[in-house]
Image: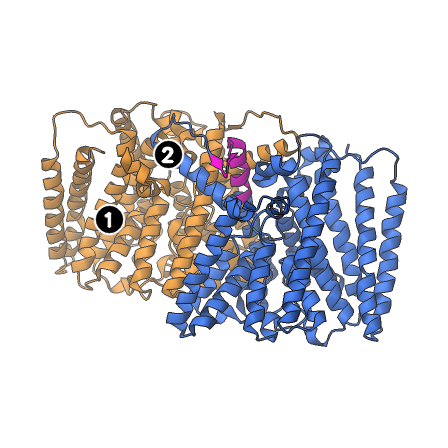
Chain colours: A blue, B orange
Amino acid sequence: MIDFRPILHICGLLMCVMAAAMALPALADLTAGNADWVVFVGSGAVTAFLGGSLVLATRSDAPVEITRRQAFALTASAWAAISIVGAIPFLSYGRHLGIADALFESVSGLTTTGATVLYDLDLHPPGILLWRSLLQWMGGVGIIVMAIVLLPFLGVGGMQLFETESSERSTRIVPRARQFVTYIGGIYSALTFACFLLYWSLGMSPFDAWNHAMTTISTGGYSTHDASFAHFDNPGLQWAGVLFMAAGGIPFVVYIRFVRGRTHALVDDVQVRAFVGFLVAVSLLLAFYLMLGRNMGVGESLRMAAFHVVSIVTTTGYASSDYTLWGTAAIGLFFALTFIGGCTGSTAGGIKIYRHQILWIAVRAYMRRLTQPHRVDVLSYGGLAVTRDIQASVLAFIAVYVGAFSVTAVLLAVIGLDFTTALSASATAFANVGPGLGDIIGPAGNYSSLPDAAKWVLAAAMLMGRLELFTLLLLLDPDYWRG
Amino acid sequence: MIDFRPILHICGLLMCVMAAAMALPALADLTAGNADWVVFVGSGAVTAFLGGSLVLATRSDAPVEITRRQAFALTASAWAAISIVGAIPFLSYGRHLGIADALFESVSGLTTTGATVLYDLDLHPPGILLWRSLLQWMGGVGIIVMAIVLLPFLGVGGMQLFETESSERSTRIVPRARQFVTYIGGIYSALTFACFLLYWSLGMSPFDAWNHAMTTISTGGYSTHDASFAHFDNPGLQWAGVLFMAAGGIPFVVYIRFVRGRTHALVDDVQVRAFVGFLVAVSLLLAFYLMLGRNMGVGESLRMAAFHVVSIVTTTGYASSDYTLWGTAAIGLFFALTFIGGCTGSTAGGIKIYRHQILWIAVRAYMRRLTQPHRVDVLSYGGLAVTRDIQASVLAFIAVYVGAFSVTAVLLAVIGLDFTTALSASATAFANVGPGLGDIIGPAGNYSSLPDAAKWVLAAAMLMGRLELFTLLLLLDPDYWRG
């Protein structure tokens, strides 16, 4: 049996952090003279009580040690715990969302997906808007820590490739993690502040600038306006968004190396090179299509193309225009881009760049063996050895990702969603992007009108995508519990 | 450099077979008093001349031996050669199809896809209808021979799993192949004849019965009527279709074992068991949905469900009703079923049952290793060892299949097809099913109105799917040609 004590202890600590964070929206509503400040104080009190009780009930003098087996249960429990308490304010503020809606909004926030069931955002009080942005900002840093410190150690989906960089083969992952968490927190905060300054200087109100800075760096995509980035109608702001969305999609390990003095770290990383190269190439292609096929001006084409390609590939999900009106080619492209994803160890979701690179390396090696069966190739990726184990992990991840996406799409169709909505909702949830295709959940739409069953399914899909599938799937395996 | 002499020699022989086959539609048109018999005599003469010249120019006294490297070029060249000569009659008969249409129809026939650009089939002379059925029938037997004799030897997509059954690790694959080809030809003809007898006895005209028997056993799906199986409106015929479509989706190696006296062969095979179990389970689920959700009667629900589930999973593509009118759940289900496929070593296309089984075995083993990294499992599939190599082959196949499907869907969207048409056309072409979704290419529709560029792309996709992707992809790799 698994010892749940340290797991519950950490969940309790995280719930206390969530409770403390609720003070900020309370303060915002109080300042604005909105009565909803009571909601946040109340939610904070409940959350603090729950979290505090857990911490006290499970404390111990021994240092916290987490085994490999416990780490899987911890990851799933932690995300479940913060998702549930994150939903409390949505249940009780002015609009009184139902449980399905509140949980959907909380999960969509914490997983930095950015799909929303709220409309008339412009009429909302500041507290709840700030809470949505905070969910994404906290979720974003949680994802980076998980992806750098925990998942390589657990070997999920080929992430053992990055193991030597951040963790060591030992059952004690906590001590070494502290140092990384400090670096990550510092860099993440600095990037957010830089983004805020730029947004503010380019014309956003300080409140909008803070909110959008938090949801940009976390590649989350929640906005304080129904029209998302289109609300501002400001080319400079859109380019600033391109810059900082891309910054959020870059591995934080690379930033850490940079900060530690390896000034070429950003240029040297094979994943970053492919990521940036891909963004530039696809944006240029789309810009040409917009110029020639849709008669857009040069500047607007480049900006529109770059903004939306970066928004979807980094899995942010901001929209500054309804790109689904750009014709069948754009729709096909944006659907396919959902399956790319950002870099690992960043706030971006999806299949991720390095997995596509490993897939390419593995398939090329496999094809060479077709004609030369006894050939043995030593494969490498940016100087790291791509073992058979890593190839198998990555291939299994991609196959299971596609399988899970398909099963979920069928489930949504059974619930009653039309073909385009079902497919794109499943894709965008697993990749933690946000907007789908079609009139209902497209970039100009909203998830509020979907049946509750679809919202539950999509919330599960967002969590599954965010936890790299296997972290959750493993818990469904009876073998895991048998031990 | 590759020695192309034996490759061209075999291509020439196959073209002579095609020329001989053209005598049958010539005879049919002559009997019916239709002037198109000249078309087939002319096409046959041209084909015989081309094929005969190739054979004579490349003959040699040495026995024909094919190396592994040559086998890949041979497979691709052979399918290209028969596809091109198969298109000749379509260019010159009464309707005078353009090159894109003629090649699309020929490739769709030979790959047993069954997507068609012809309409008003009921008004067509018998010769061209018979030619379409013959293309599928000959394509079907070609696929079985290729899948049993050639591909396991080449190790494409995990098919080395079936190597010991049919071929031996040697560079001489021809002698041993002869014996298998004889068995396959005999069983294939016997099944076709049995299917003809049943169709005829249940009310089809002899001409319809022959044509449909040929396109049923080959899981092809071409019909002599625009309405496909709905034309007959005969429950008995639909159940007969279910039986023989399923028969076409079963590995012919199993039939060979059965004929050789292993009477339990059909029941013992793990792939056949999963295939039949899956068909029964999904048909029952869909039948319940039709009874409860669409108020259909019990008998009709069972028949409609079984007919269409078997039609899509075996990649036949007959329709006896427009199932896309059964609501979003049915549409989602049928799209997903496109990605299942029949058994390997049968006429069915798609990803195929055994690959899904190996995927499941590999993913389970991978998940066990997540908590116990040093664990070593010996995996087996129906008594055969599932090595790391086979797992990697299967996973690479599935990943590349999904990738190729996605890229093709985007290409079709760029050409101008709407989201549903582009996605379903790509899926149905790679899986060699036939009908897609939506008004244009759905079960009640037709491919004739698509732009020529889309027809070229889809013909390439059908060939790629039929040749298990890597047989064609390998030829695009410069390493293959270098040596």
Q: Position of residue A162 (x, y in %)?
A: 59, 38
Please tell me whether residue B200 is drawn above or below residue B296 in the rendered image.
above
Residue A443 visible? The answer is: no
Using the numbered discs, state the Cα–Cα distance from disc 1 to disc 2 in whole angstroms. Answer: 28 Å
Q: Nearer the viewer, residue B275 or B214?
A: B275
Dot 1: few (<14), some (14–19), or many (≥20) neighbours within 10 Å? many
Please tell me whether residue B260 is drawn above or below residue A324 in the rendered image.
above
Q: Residue A298 is drawn in which quadrant? A: bottom left
Q: Nearer the viewer, residue B338 or A324?
A: A324
Amino acid type of the residue that numbered disc 1 sits on in the rendered structure = Ser
Which part of the image, by quadrant, shows the C terminus of chain B?
A: top left
Helix, strand or loop at mark 2: helix
Question: In the rendering, which numbered label is found on residue B83?
Answer: 1
Magenta region: which residues?
A: A380-398
Q: Name the residue located 33 percent from the left edge and 40 percent from the top edge.
A: B474
**Mark 2 sits on what residue?**
A368
Q: Name the residue located 77 percent from the left edge and 55 percent from the top edge.
A: A84
Q: Is residue B49 magenta?
A: no
Q: Which chain letter matches label 1?
A: B
Which part of the image, by quadrant, shows the N terminus of chain B?
A: top left
Helix, strand or loop at mark 1: helix
Q: Position of residue A276 (x, y in %)?
A: 50, 53
